[in-house]
Amino acid sequence: MGLGKVLFIDTAHPALKEGLENLGFVCDYFPNADLGDFIRLAPDYTGFIVRSRIALDENILPKAVQLKFIGRVGAGMENIDVGLAEKLGIHCLNAPEGNRDAVGEQAIGMLLALMNRLLIVDPEVRQGVWKRAENRGNEIMGKTVAIIGFGNTGGAFARKLSGFGVTLLVYDKYKQDFPEPWVIASDMDRIFAEADILSLHVPLTSETKYLVNADYLGRFKKPIWFINTSRGGVVNTTDLMKGIDSGSIRGACLDVLEFEKFSFEDIQLQQLPAVYQQLIASNKVILSPHIAGWTHESNIKMAEVLVAKIKLLFGL
């Protein structure tokens, strides 16, 4: 007898469907379905697989009377009402173990490009402009790097930075013990006093919405390089740009923007404020379209992580 049906609300690596079918599930995907269709289909399914296409909240979860699990292909769970799901006996699974290394690598790559002015010098050289003294870079070695949030991605970023000869200060509101020998548990006062580089690795919640604002940035004693590979809504972009313009922010690496659509698949082109134009015009900012955790390798690793977690959940 099969284990029931799994509804793929979003696309995922084929290894996820194959792995679930090998366990005994039947998998369905309806690419043209909308929220109304998913609500109608919900009662028939044992599992949902989702990225960020729709919100799994009170509109759909109570209708999913057979639902045992939600598998989020990624790390963030902000599009899932986890509290409601748990009340309904639905297990919420995600796969941060699958993309943490991808995020850590991109954060370092963006930082190296920013500190060494690579996005500035490359087009200059292509145009025959040969400026050496004006384009001196800065080394990561010897800097103090502050990591806010020490879950999967924060830990991977720290591990990859550990060979760069930096001081790694870590703050996580919900963790106190850090067994990794290359990090130093810190409070925010020390981070504000000593940090040269700040990297965010926190989920988007009511606590972290606009965590980084003018007041927060104003507490740093030194100009900092800033990295955000977590969620765009954690940062007030207007305040960040003011910091860049004033020189208190030496530069920013942003894989995520507060102007993204709910699904993360695009930005809200019809509603972009003036600060967006400032952002894209600045040569002190490096941008990417929410792809830090979306490498070819992480795509399959996230699938494998979810299959393993679902297998464990069902005792298979």
Image (cartoon, rainbow, N blue to C red):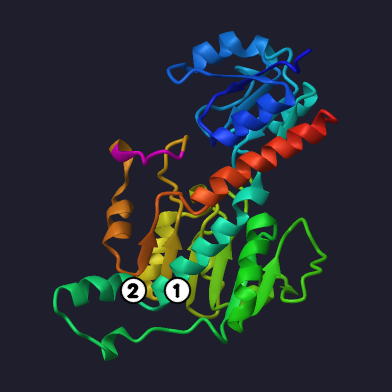
In the figure, residue 302 lies in which quadrant? Answer: top right
Part of the protein shown in magenta: 264-269
- The CA distance from mark 2 to mark 1 is 8 Å
Three-letter residue code for mark 2: Leu
Q: Which one is nearer the viewer's eye here, 131 or 247?
A: 131
Q: Residue at horizontal 66%, vertical 32%?
A: 19
Residue 304 percent coordinates (x, y): 66, 41
Give the quarter of the image for residue 251. bottom left
Characterize the magenta stretch by its predominant secondary structure.
Answer: loop
- Residue at 60%, 17% (x, y): give it: 59
Residue drawn 55% across the image and 69% down it: 198
Please give the residue where the numbered disc 2 appears in the rendered image. 118
Q: Is residue 228 visible?
A: yes
Labels 2 and 1 touching (C-beta < 8 A):
yes
The foreground one among 286 and 258 is: 286
- The residue sitting at 28% across, 91% down in the picture is 133
Residue 216 vertical position relative to residue 97 in the rendered view, above or below: below
Left or right of 15 on screen, residue 281: left
Amino acid type of the residue that numbered disc 1 sits on in the rendered structure: Leu
Determine crowd level at label 1: few under 14, some 14-19, many 20+ residues with C-alpha closer than 10 A: some
| Residue of label 1 | 112
Count of residue discs: 2
Q: Is residue 75 in view?
A: no
